[in-house]
Amino acid sequence: PKQKGWVGSYVYNYQGFWALPRLIQGVIACQRQFQAEDNDIILVTAPKSGTTWLKALLFSLVNRKKYPIFKKNHPLLVKNPHDLVPLLEQDLYVDGQVPDFSLFTSPRLMATHVPFASLPKSVQNSRTKLVYLCRNPRDTFISMWQFTNNLRLDSHRDTNSIEEMFDHFCKGVGLYGPFWSHVLGYWKESIENPDKVLFLMYEEIKKQPKIQLKRMAEFLDCPFSIEEEDCRVVDEILRMCSFGNLRNVEVNVNGKMSAGMANKNFFRRGEVGDWKNYFTVEMNDKLNYIVEQKFHGCGLKFVYI
Ligand code: A3P
């Protein structure tokens, strides 16, 4: 089945989630060909949950010996996080291309938006670790709405009405939607298999960044040493990856991603609670009802402010 869903293009349903044909082809190629390795790290998000931020954080964390933070040649000062941590189905397995993994250093750091049930089997069967970042659905929706509108403005097309997009979102139609299935798939796996999936929340990283970054380091078996703590490496990584810093890096002000999107579109407000500026009472009631139905009893609580 197909539905109008993304910047005026149709999205199609594949294995229960929605995506553009090009992405679905990437997912299928990935499912067939990707061979996960035991020390791979795969970062996972539903779009607009803070992928850019998590990419920057994990890249700096995992490579901190190779690239000391804030040294002039640090890759994050000259490249956009999306060009440093490729998306499996969009950047690596795209248009029938065979990815060149020899360019990767170990551990390989990659990303995906694919729901848990549709991950390549080798990811599920290996010791590959998954770091999942979740964001509350109201801010995620507003971020997506704003993002698609900016893309439309870039290509001189009309913007989406918030009502129309909200209706799609509530029906679960949108890139990699339904949102709830995406979140629940990884949430359940993180409970059953905590060594495999680390479940993070955008709002918690905002509130307690140091604690959350240390959690990531421990989960990935690269905890901060006492010397590193003394040298304030944790603070430095957080400062380097902060919204204010990344947004002002030249490549993010004027650069474009390899996929052609302007880097600046990935740095809008970077806050919790922006939904309040857009949501009507009706929208709030409708989403609350859906969230209550979908997440009832699973133990996951979203933070909205
Ligand atoms: P807003 O649109 O609410 O500002 P993604 O990276 O998954 O596409 O998500 C984009 C959202 O993450 C945007 O949210 C963007 O501003 C926010 N973001 C990007 N970099 C960030 C950072 N370093 N810290 C916090 N939020 C960030």
Image (cartoon, helix red, strand yellow):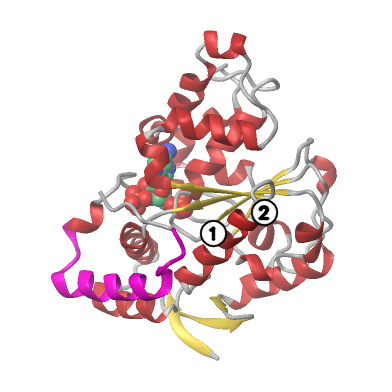
The mark total stands at: 2
Residue plotted at (32% across, 52% down): 303
Find residue 33 and report its horizontal and vertical position in percent.
83, 65
Q: Is-magenta flag for residue 297?
A: yes
Amino acid found under the numbered disc labelled 2: Asn
Please state the extent of the stretch shown in magenta in the rendering. 277-299
* Mark 1 secondary-structure assignment: helix
Outermost residue to the left: 281
Can you tell which quarter of the image residue 61 is in? top right
Query: Is residue 69 among what the camera can see?
Result: yes
Judge from the rendering whether residue 82 lies leftward or rightward of residue 129; answer left or right: left
The residue that disc 1 covers is 187
* Mark 2 secondary-structure assignment: loop
Judge from the rendering whether residue 100 lies leftward or rightward of residue 301; answer left or right: right
Mark 2 / mark 1, whichever is N-terminal: 1
* Ligand 1 lies under 8 Å from the Cβ of mark 2: no
Residue plotted at (67% across, 63% down): 89
Q: Is residue 237 above or below residue 38?
A: above
> For mark 1, does the 10 Å Cα neighbourhood hold few (<14), some (14 to 19), or many (20 or more) residues?
many
Residue 285 got which mark? none
Can you tell which quarter of the image residue 173 is in? bottom left
**Distance between the alpha carbons at the discs numbered 2 and 1:** 10 Å
Task: Pick the residue in front: 83 or 229.
Answer: 229
